[in-house]
């Protein structure tokens, strides 16, 4: 009997290993659980430069949305969960509604910019904060002991932050809800901001139809600015973009490139973009709502290919259930 059990166990292990090794695509969603607003990134430093990382919002009622998990992969297909890389237990001023992380590596440290408390006015405590860790898997701890931005400027709710490193090494913070988007020039140590030449700290760059979720990347010397449109709980949630010669625009809306497919999923939006190093190969990481779900918080994280036409315009993204093929990093 023992020999039979041992043989059965070996067969199960072998079959499981074979299935894992022959998985052709990532599948969508990428990992189980309700996760939204994903930021995908590849870090530069060893030993983490050969992995993809995704930092999403834990999608739950605001009172329960008090921590963030992260996920890593060496090939976009198999993902490892890193639980509670950021927790409000380590952020004294953050009480709820922890969301939309943006992360960047600098001087062998990892800085996570996040929104907290969903403030509705200048009289409430909360806004955009910064946490820091020695490792991408955390734990992240409060860097400033207070929010980096805790007021409304130019009508922008202090949420949905994205930190961007320009070609000259300058770091900028793009952010904003309530249909307004600002950009600000970060100090080198991320403790505050440097005024622009006109003395202003926050420059409004809001394009037509902007709602929230800004993202920026550079391709062939051009600045691609992207954002989410529509309502985050509705089927009209989507992503549009503009192209400019400067990180400040002007950003003239070109059109939508990510939106729902009623045959696959609804409410596709709040995204980020990953480029495979040294290749013109791009992925869009985003959240969407399964067709079976009506709860606003029931969102899942997915990935699909993002391509360009001969003129550099982004082709409409085809959202899939299959996801993407394995793409190991060097």
Image (cartoon, rainbow, N blue to C red):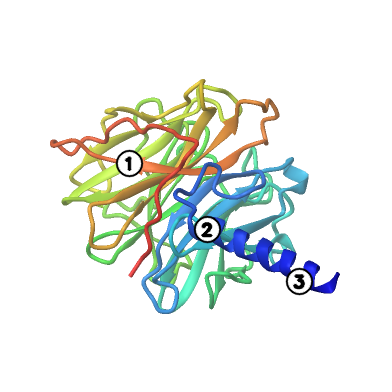
- List the residue tagged with mark 3: 6
User: Quick check: 126 left or right of 177?
Assistant: right
Q: Quadrant of residue 240?
A: top left
Q: Nearer the viewer, residue 122 or 49?
A: 49
Q: Residue at x 38, y 63 (%)?
A: 328
Q: Is residue 76 visible?
A: yes
Q: Nearer the viewer, mark 3 or mark 2?
A: 3
Label 3, label 2: how many angstroms apart (C-alpha)?
A: 28 Å
Disc 3 from disc 1: Cα separation: 47 Å
Q: Which badge, 2 or 1, comes first in the chain's sequence?
A: 2
Residue 286 x/y as whole percent: 48, 42
Rendered-image quadrant of the C terminus: bottom left
Upstream in sequence: badge 3 or badge 2: 3
Q: Which mark is residue 306?
A: 1
Q: Nearer the viewer, residue 167 or 311?
A: 311
Left or right: 78 with respect to 44? right
Residue 233, position in %: x, y? Answer: 61, 28
Element type at mark 3: helix
Marks 2 and 1 sit apart, C-alpha to C-alpha, by 20 Å
Q: Badges 3 and 2: C-beta atoms under 8 Å apart?
A: no
Q: Position of residue 117 (x, y in %)?
A: 68, 48
Disc 2 designates what residue?
Answer: 78
Q: Earlier in the sequence, mark 3 or mark 1?
A: 3
Give neighbour class at mark 2: few <14, some 14-19, many 20+ (Cα, 10 Å): some
Residue 140 vertical position relative to residue 71 in the rendered view, above or below: below
27 on left or right of 62: left
Secondary element at tag 1 = strand
């Amino acid at each position: 009997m023992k020999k039979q059990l041992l043989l059965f166990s070996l067969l199960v292990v072998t079959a499981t290993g074979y299935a894992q090794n022959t998985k052709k695509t990532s599948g969508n969603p990428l990992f189980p659980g309700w996760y939204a607003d994903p930021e995908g990134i590849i870090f530069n430093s060893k030993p983490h430069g050969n992995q993809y990382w995704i930092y999403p919002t834990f999608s739950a009622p605001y009172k329960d949305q008090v921590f963030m998990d992260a996920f890593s992969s060496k090939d976009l297909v198999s993902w490892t969960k890193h639980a509670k890389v950021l927790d409000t237990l380590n952020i004294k001023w953050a009480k709820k509604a922890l969301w939309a992380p943006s992360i960047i590596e600098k001087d062998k440290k990892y800085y996570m910019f996040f929104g907290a408390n969903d403030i509705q006015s200048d009289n409430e405590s909360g806004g955009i904060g910064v946490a820091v860790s020695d490792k991408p898997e955390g734990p992240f701890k409060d860097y400033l002991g207070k929010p980096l931005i805790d007021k409304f400027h130019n009508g922008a709710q202090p949420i949905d932050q994205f930190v961007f490193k320009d070609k000259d090494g300058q770091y900028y913070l793009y952010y904003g809800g309530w249909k307004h988007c600002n950009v600000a020039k970060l100090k080198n140590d991320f403790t505050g901001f440097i005024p622009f030449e006109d003395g202003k700290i926050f420059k409004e760059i809001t394009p037509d139809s902007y709602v929230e979720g800004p993202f920026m990347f550079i391709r062939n010397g051009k600045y691609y600015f992207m954002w989410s449109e529509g309502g985050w709980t509705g089927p009209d949630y989507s992503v549009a973009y503009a192209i400019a010669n400067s990180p400040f625009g002007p950003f003239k809306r070109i059109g939508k490139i990510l939106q729902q497919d009623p045959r696959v999923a609804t409410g596709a939006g709040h995204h980020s973009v990953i480029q495979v190093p040294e290749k013109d190969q791009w992925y869009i990481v985003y959240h969407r709502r399964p067709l079976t779900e009506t709860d606003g918080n029931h969102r899942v994280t997915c990935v699909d290919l993002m391509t360009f036409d001969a003129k550099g315009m982004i082709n409409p993204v085809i959202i899939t259930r299959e996801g993407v093929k394995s793409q190991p990093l060097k």
